[in-house]
Amino acid sequence: MPFLLEKVDITSSADLHSLYGNDIPVIHIDGREAFRQRVDEARFLLLLSPTD
Protein backbone atom coordinates (compact mmCIF):
# COMPACT_ATOMS: atom_id res chain seq x y z
CA MET A 1 0.00 0.00 0.00
CA PRO A 2 1.83 3.15 -1.15
CA PHE A 3 2.03 6.20 1.09
CA LEU A 4 4.25 9.23 1.61
CA LEU A 5 6.49 9.10 4.67
CA GLU A 6 7.86 12.31 6.12
CA LYS A 7 10.42 11.85 8.88
CA VAL A 8 10.82 14.82 11.26
CA ASP A 9 13.58 15.13 13.86
CA ILE A 10 11.82 16.74 16.84
CA THR A 11 15.16 17.91 18.27
CA SER A 12 15.34 20.43 15.40
CA SER A 13 12.32 22.31 16.81
CA ALA A 14 11.85 23.44 20.40
CA ASP A 15 8.07 23.45 19.87
CA LEU A 16 7.98 19.86 18.61
CA HIS A 17 10.35 18.68 21.31
CA SER A 18 8.19 20.35 23.95
CA LEU A 19 5.02 18.86 22.45
CA TYR A 20 6.23 15.28 22.01
CA GLY A 21 9.25 14.92 24.34
CA ASN A 22 9.74 11.19 24.89
CA ASP A 23 6.43 10.18 23.25
CA ILE A 24 8.07 9.12 20.01
CA PRO A 25 7.39 7.83 17.49
CA VAL A 26 4.34 9.94 16.72
CA ILE A 27 2.47 9.04 13.56
CA HIS A 28 0.14 11.47 11.81
CA ILE A 29 -2.14 10.33 9.01
CA ASP A 30 -3.82 12.99 6.88
CA GLY A 31 -2.72 15.66 9.36
CA ARG A 32 -4.23 13.95 12.40
CA GLU A 33 -2.34 12.17 15.16
CA ALA A 34 -3.00 8.44 14.86
CA PHE A 35 -0.34 6.88 17.11
CA ARG A 36 2.01 7.88 19.88
CA GLN A 37 4.80 5.64 21.26
CA ARG A 38 3.41 2.43 19.72
CA VAL A 39 1.97 1.61 16.31
CA ASP A 40 -0.73 -1.01 15.90
CA GLU A 41 -0.11 -2.60 12.49
CA ALA A 42 -3.72 -3.63 11.83
CA ARG A 43 -5.07 -0.17 12.69
CA PHE A 44 -2.27 1.49 10.68
CA LEU A 45 -3.22 -0.48 7.57
CA LEU A 46 -6.90 0.25 8.14
CA LEU A 47 -6.21 3.98 8.41
CA LEU A 48 -4.24 3.90 5.15
CA SER A 49 -6.99 2.07 3.28
CA PRO A 50 -9.03 4.14 0.82
CA THR A 51 -12.55 4.94 2.05
CA ASP A 52 -14.45 5.19 -1.23
Image (tube, helix red, strand yellow):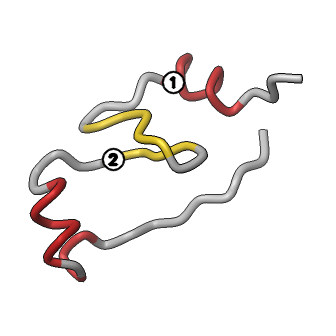
Using the rendered view, name the quadrant where residue 37 is placed: top left
Looking at the rendered structure, the kind of residue marked 2 is Val
Q: Position of residue 50 (x, y in %)?
A: 81, 29
Q: Is residue 1 above or below residue 51?
A: below
Label tally: 2
31 to the left or right of 37: right
Under tag 1, what secondary structure?
A: helix
Residue 20, percent from left and from top:
18, 54
Residue 23, image x, y percentages:
17, 45
Q: Is residue 45 depicted above or below 8 in this figure? A: above
Q: Quadrant of residue 7?
A: bottom left
Residue at the spot x=23%, y=49% of the render? Answer: 24
Which element type, helix, strand or loop, lies under badge 2? strand
Pointer 2 residue: 26
**Residue 21 x/y as whole percent:** 10, 56
Identify which amino acid the numbered label 1 is placed on. Glu
Image quadrant holding the C terminus, namely: top right
Left or right of residue 23: residue 33: right
Which numbered disc covers residue 41? 1
Query: Which residue ends up furthest to the bottom in the rendered image?
Result: 12
Residue at 29% across, 37% down: 36
Q: How far apart in space, not on screen, are marks 1 and 2 (Cα)?
A: 14 Å
Residue 34 is left or right of residue 1, and the answer is left
Instruction: Pick whichever of labels 1 and 2 is earlier in the sequence.
Output: 2
In the rendered structure, find residue 33 and report the number of the disc placed on it.
Answer: none
Front residue (pair 38, 10): 10
Q: Nearer the viewer, residue 27 or 18?
A: 18
